[in-house]
Image: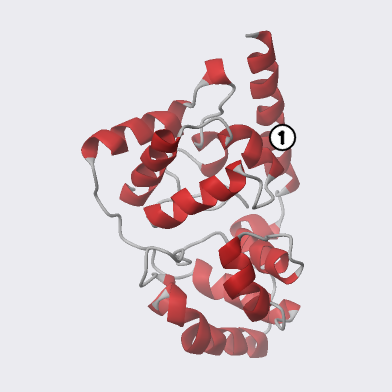
Amino acid sequence: MRNYQLTLFSITLMCVAGAAASQQPAGDKPPPVTATGYSAAVSKAVNLCSTCHGPYGVSVSPEFPNLAAQRPGYLAAQLKNFQEHTRAETAAHDFMWGIAGPLDNETIAGLAKYYSEQKPAPPHPGNPALIAKGRAIFDKGFPDRGILACATCHGSDAQGNLDFPRLAGQNATYVVRQLEAIQSATRAAPVMHGIVQNLSPEEVVSVAEFVQSE
């Protein structure tokens, strides 16, 4: 029990520290971008990104994430991670490495601004029992198992907090795949790995169903 408490305390400190480090414009405001850079980013969003992420960032396939209304600091950071190959899960390697590679900093900032300003994807109701279980995990976690509540970093309404990403309305299929990638450390996310590594497959699905329904 003491080890679980220490783990939970350590993870809480990491989330608080991460939030404190994000107390800068990137958290709630898009990174700075010129009118020219923004125009180029919008063109790329419309003509390229929409192929997978849908018009205005609402995905046309559950395999690809919604980008609409996502936190701009998070979007910019993930594009940098794709560029630097620090996100190495299969989909990142197959799709995003090549797409993000040529982007300059201003285009990244423009894409983050554009998508953060779009109307969020609508919620998708699913299995009520799974949603209820997922809500409980999201809101409370499992303190006795060292699993922090998701709401601690992602907000009580799953709409994100500073640079922690918005999860509300996100496609459940995509969320499950990302949680599995983090559990296996295929996707490098040290803080998240410590939080989700002990979730069962059913619990992972429950959390995904809940956030999709928000």
Compared across the picture, whether 163 is left or right of 80 comes to left
Outermost residue, top side: 1
Residue 142, above or below 155 = above
**Residue visible at 58% across and 89% down in the picture:** 39
Q: Quadrant of residue 143?
A: top right
Q: Quadrant of residue 6?
A: top right
Q: Quadrant of residue 35?
A: bottom right
Residue 182, x across and y down, in percent: 60, 46
Residue 60, x across and y down, in percent: 35, 72
**Residue visible at 51% across and 80% down in the picture:** 49
**Visual colour scheme:** secondary structure
Residue 169, above or below 31 = above
The secondary element bearing badge 1 is classed as: helix
Compared across the picture, whether 119 is left or right of 166 comes to left
Residue 156, x across and y down, in percent: 45, 38
Nearest the eye: 166 or 96 = 96
Counting every numbered tag in the picture gives 1
Give the amino acid at mark 1: Met
**Residue visible at 45% across and 73% down in the picture:** 53
Residue 23, x across and y down, in percent: 70, 49
**Residue 170 visible in this rendered orientation of the protein:** no
Residue 49, above or below 122 = below
Residue designated by label 1: 14
**Residue 178 visible in this rendered orientation of the protein:** yes
Q: Residues within 10 Å of mark 1 (few under 14, many from 20)?
A: some
Compared across the picture, whether 143 is left or right of 24 comes to left
Where is the N terminus found, in terms of image quarters?
Answer: top right
